[in-house]
Structure formats: C-alpha cells, structure tokens
C-alpha cells in the first residue's frame, strides 16, 4: 500500500497482461526442456506464434530476454502470426500457451535420438523381464487357485499396465528417426 497521503499510482493492466503472457511462454518452453531432459546449457530453436499482433509485437520486443530465460538460441528464434507449425520444421513439440499463443520446438533440437533410442530400448528390456516374471507367476500351478483373489487381480492389473507401457515404449522407438 502507498504511504499515507501519497497519491495512488496508475496501474497499467495491459502491461501486466503482456508480462504474464511472456512469463507463460518462458515457463512452457522451460517445462518442455525439462520434460525432454534437454541439457541445461544446450540452446534450442523455437517458433513463437501469436494470432494477436499486439501480443506478437510485445513478445518479439522481449526476444533477448526470452532467449536468455528459456535457453533458446537467438538465431533459432522466430516469431509468426500463424498458429501453425512452420512447414520446414519437421517433427515439432507443440506447446499451447494461451488462447492465440503457441510455441513450436523442433524435436531434433530437443532430443539426442541415439541416446533416446538407447534409453527406450533399456526401458523395453526391463519391461519385458518384468512382464515375463508376472506371466510366469500367473501361469504357475497353484498361484491363481491358492492366492487370494485380490492378489491375483492385482498381478493381472500390473501385467496389463506393463504390457501397455511396453507397447507405448515400442511405439516411441518406432517413431524415432532412423539412425544415420
């Protein structure tokens, strides 16, 4: 609160809204970087899209701050009034930040495909081993007959969940670009 007797200062609601949008865009990119486990020092490319010209101009005017805070390569940063992935960007991560504000991050910048393939294949191997153990336990004579129904149901549920996880991991491996 202002000091007693001091005049009230004007509040620029539009500036507050622009800054909130800027924060949301930075947060979305940083969250995507964390989700894809991008190395902290690695700078990535980004295309920031805003359908509203004023919002786009405000974001563009803060390009240097955005590049610094979101760890985006200044040369790989582009702004567009079109809410569509750039035609030449290949596979992208699409971030919907707010109504009329979106960001596209080229997947090639986020992921080391060789490392990601190795990680997914290791995860698939662990899942296969776990599925095999569960299948062996469920097919063992006496387990399904003698174990409490709750334990058998839990084992079946766990088996189903792991089979679904394995299917998702294998699908992710298949979607990765072929190795050079």
Image (cartoon, rainbow, N blue to C red):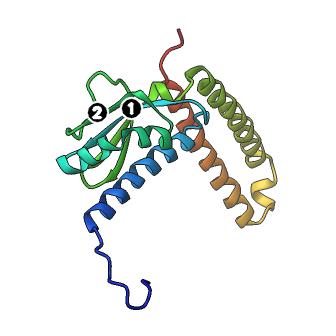
The percent coordinates of residue 142 (x first, y second) are 82, 53
Residue 39 placement: quadrant: top right
The percent coordinates of residue 149 (x first, y second) are 71, 65
Labels 2 & 1 near each other (Cβ < 8 A)? yes
Q: In this view, does 22 lie above or below 42?
A: below
Please give the name of the residue rendered at 25% of the width and 63% of the height, measured from the top-left corner.
Answer: 14
Please give the name of the residue rendered at 35% of the width and 41% of the height, measured from the top-left corner.
Answer: 103
Residue 88 placement: quadrant: top left
| Residue 70: numbered disc | none
Most distant residue in the top direction? 180
First in sequence: mark 2 or mark 1? 2
What SS does tag 2 mark? loop
Q: Is residue 96 above or below residue 127?
A: below
Residue under numbered circle 1: 92
| Residue 85: numbered disc | 2
Q: Can residue 175 be seen in this view?
A: no
What SS does tag 1 mark? strand
Most distant residue in the bottom direction? 4
The percent coordinates of residue 81 (x first, y second) are 20, 39
Mark count: 2
């Amino acid at each position: 609160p202002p000091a007693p007797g001091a005049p009230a200062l004007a509040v620029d609601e539009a500036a507050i809204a622009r800054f909130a949008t800027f924060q949301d865009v930075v947060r979305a990119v940083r969250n995507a970087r964390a989700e894809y486990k991008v190395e902290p020092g690695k700078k990535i490319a980004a295309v920031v899209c805003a359908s509203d010209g004023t919002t786009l101009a405000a974001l563009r005017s803060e390009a240097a701050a955005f590049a610094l805070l979101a760890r985006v390569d200044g040369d790989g940063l582009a702004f567009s009034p079109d809410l569509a992935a750039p035609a030449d960007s290949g596979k992208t991560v699409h971030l919907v930040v707010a109504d009329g504000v979106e960001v596209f991050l080229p997947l090639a910048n986020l992921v080391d495909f060789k490392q990601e393939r190795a990680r997914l294949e290791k995860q698939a191997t662990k899942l296969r081993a776990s599925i095999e153990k569960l299948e062996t336990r469920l097919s063992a004579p006496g387990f399904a007959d003698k174990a409490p129904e709750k334990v058998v149901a839990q084992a079946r549920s766990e088996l189903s969940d792991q089979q679904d996880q394995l299917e998702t991991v294998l699908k992710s491996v298949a979607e990765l670009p072929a190795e050079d």
